[in-house]
């Protein structure tokens, strides 16, 4: 044992299992194993016995050996998935296929469940099965598609696979996930609205202590989450100095601490990051802006293949995130972004549309390059002062004016005016509640001295989905 430990310290490999034991170990407890699989075991044993070194005469084949073995792994995974589906169909296993793999082959839970769900999807679509069995797509890609499209119909699965079939072998795992998300947005537009409500209810920030440290974990809706990360990354970049060995994660922690320490002072964040404004950017076509402004529902995509591969989607509302990943916004988030100065709205004429509510309004206002909103979309400093005097803070919870945003009672995109009687102060939380249509704010017709200026009315839950205009 001493010699073995010392060998490990010197970097020499531990004694290998004798090759003669490999077939017995692989076939242990499998007395009824088919002959074709036994032949694979024999071939693998021969491969394991082959020398792998960089010596003259063998080094030139190492790269090819690595490539082919990696492809064989995908082929074996595909065959395991196919066999798992057949075994479950004929009810020959004592446990689920994933549990069987974990208990009899020492697979991890994620690997076992991944190959099983991939096998089920491939069994339903021969074109995907062929790509997998020939090593042109990985098990991870097939499993991601299976999980991302869970719950949809066979027809929807087929439409997605048809749309991406030619590109699938060259797509990264991240790209596949993005296309799946976009497909669901295009085919099930109403789901985006429901998901927005669910995401809002899931928001949370928790903390725990461990070993003298505080662990903070947050779940934030996409729009707000990216605004937080954009601010943290900008401040983290400004804290970097020459020769600083700190990691990106450490600088973000420093930035969060700095933000808290500066909470009493406003406007203290760096104005730019790498020359760009510290703000998320929402790019929206005129046709989509008009749909949001008029309260019309999104319609399912009539041509999924064209929308996914053609690079032109008039229905898209894209949030340009700090990580570069596309995020689809719900209508409430769009309305919120058009009110909040911390997000930059860019309206483009995607369809050369004629007179429409938004395009007509844009035509009557001074436009910056790329039509970046109206010149007076946000409240002026004088209006902010007057709103603070009138409302005294958030009209729903009373948070001080310094922590509030101005909200247009009539959406700016729908022709709302930036006038004092058309705006209220709302804290961030209740601003989002309003844009999710969970409450309505109306002027109180009773202007008596003891009466509130605004009436706050809860919206019935069944009306949360869409905001009336």
Image: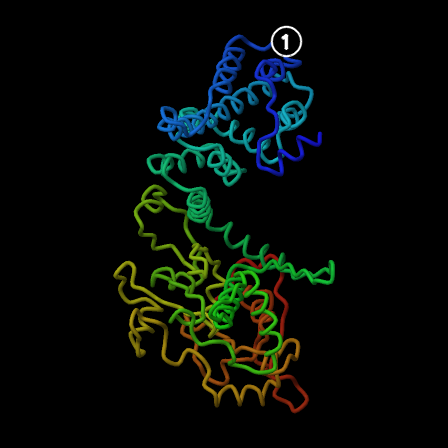
Determine which quarter of the picture holds residue 440: bottom right
**Image quarter (top left, top right, bottom left or bottom right) of the N terminus:** top right
Q: On screen, 108 above or below 201?
A: above
Q: Identify the residue under disc 1.
A: 31
Residue 290 visible? The answer is yes
Q: Nearer the viewer, residue 21 or 209?
A: 21
Q: On screen, 409 above or below 91?
A: below
Q: Secondary structure at mark 1?
A: loop
Q: Is residue 444 left or right of residue 288?
A: right
Q: Nearer the viewer, residue 124 or 156?
A: 124
Residue 127 visible? The answer is no
Disc 1 residue crowd, few under 14, some 14–19, many 20+, Cα 10 Å: few
Residue 283 in the image, given as x and y percentages of width and height: 38, 63
Residue 220 in the image, given as x and y percentages of width and height: 58, 60
| Number of residue marks | 1
Q: On screen, 330 above or below 167?
A: below
Q: Nearer the viewer, residue 8 or 155?
A: 8
Q: Nearer the viewer, residue 183 or 85?
A: 85
Q: On screen, 176 above or below 213?
A: above
Q: Is residue 66 left or right of residue 440?
A: left
Which residue corresponds to the image point at 72% horizontal and 60% vertical from the top-left? 208
Determine which quarter of the picture holds residue 308: top left
Residue 295 in the image, given as x and y percentages of width and height: 45, 62
């Amino acid at each position: 044992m001493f010699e073995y430990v010392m060998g490990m310290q010197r970097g020499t490999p531990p004694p290998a299992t004798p090759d003669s034991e490999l077939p017995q170990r692989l076939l242990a407890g499998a007395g009824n194993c088919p002959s074709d699989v036994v032949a694979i075991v024999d071939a693998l044993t021969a491969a394991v016995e082959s020398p792998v070194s960089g010596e003259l005469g063998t080094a030139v084949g190492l790269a090819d050996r690595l490539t082919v073995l990696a492809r064989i792994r995908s082929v074996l995974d595909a065959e395991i998935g196919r066999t798992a589906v057949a075994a479950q169909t004929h009810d020959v296993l004592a446990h689920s296929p994933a549990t069987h793999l974990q208990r009899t082959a020492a697979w991890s839970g994620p690997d076992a469940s991944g190959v099983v769900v991939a096998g089920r999807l491939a069994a339903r679509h021969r074109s995907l099965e062929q790509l997998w069995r020939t090593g042109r797509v990985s098990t991870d890609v097939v499993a991601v598609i299976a999980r991302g499209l869970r719950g949809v119909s066979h027809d929807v699965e087929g439409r997605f696979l048809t749309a991406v079939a030619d590109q699938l072998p060259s797509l990264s795992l991240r790209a596949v996930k993005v296309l799946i998300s976009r497909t669901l947005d295009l085919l099930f537009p109403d789901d985006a609205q429901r998901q927005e409500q669910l995401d809002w209810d899931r928001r949370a920030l928790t903390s725990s202590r461990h070993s003298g440290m505080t662990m903070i974990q947050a779940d934030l809706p996409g729009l707000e989450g990216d605004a937080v990360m954009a601010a943290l990354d900008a401040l983290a970049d400004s804290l970097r100095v020459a020769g600083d060995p700190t990691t990106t994660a450490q600088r973000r922690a420093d930035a969060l601490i700095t933000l808290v320490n500066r909470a009493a002072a406003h406007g203290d964040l760096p104005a730019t990051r790498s020359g760009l404004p510290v703000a998320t950017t929402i790019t929206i076509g005129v046709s989509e802006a008009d749909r949001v402004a008029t309260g019309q529902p999104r319609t399912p995509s009539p041509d999924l293949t064209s929308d996914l591969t053609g690079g032109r989607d008039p229905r898209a509302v894209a949030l340009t995130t700090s990580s570069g990943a596309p995020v689809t916004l719900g209508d409430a988030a769009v309305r919120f972004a058009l009110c909040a100065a911390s997000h930059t709205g860019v309206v483009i004429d995607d369809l050369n549309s004629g007179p429409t509510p938004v395009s007509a309004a844009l035509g009557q206002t001074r436009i910056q390059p790329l039509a970046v909103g109206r010149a007076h979309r946000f409240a002026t400093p004088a209006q902010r002062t007057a709103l603070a005097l009138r409302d005294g803070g958030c009209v729903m919870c009373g948070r001080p004016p310094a922590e509030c945003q101005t909200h247009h009672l009539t959406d700016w995109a729908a022709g709302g005016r930036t006038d004092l009687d058309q705006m209220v102060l709302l804290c961030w939380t209740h601003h989002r509640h309003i844009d999710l249509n969970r409450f309505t704010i109306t002027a109180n017709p009773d202007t008596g001295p003891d009466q509130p200026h605004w009436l706050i009315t809860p919206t019935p839950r069944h009306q949360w989905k869409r905001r009336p205009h």
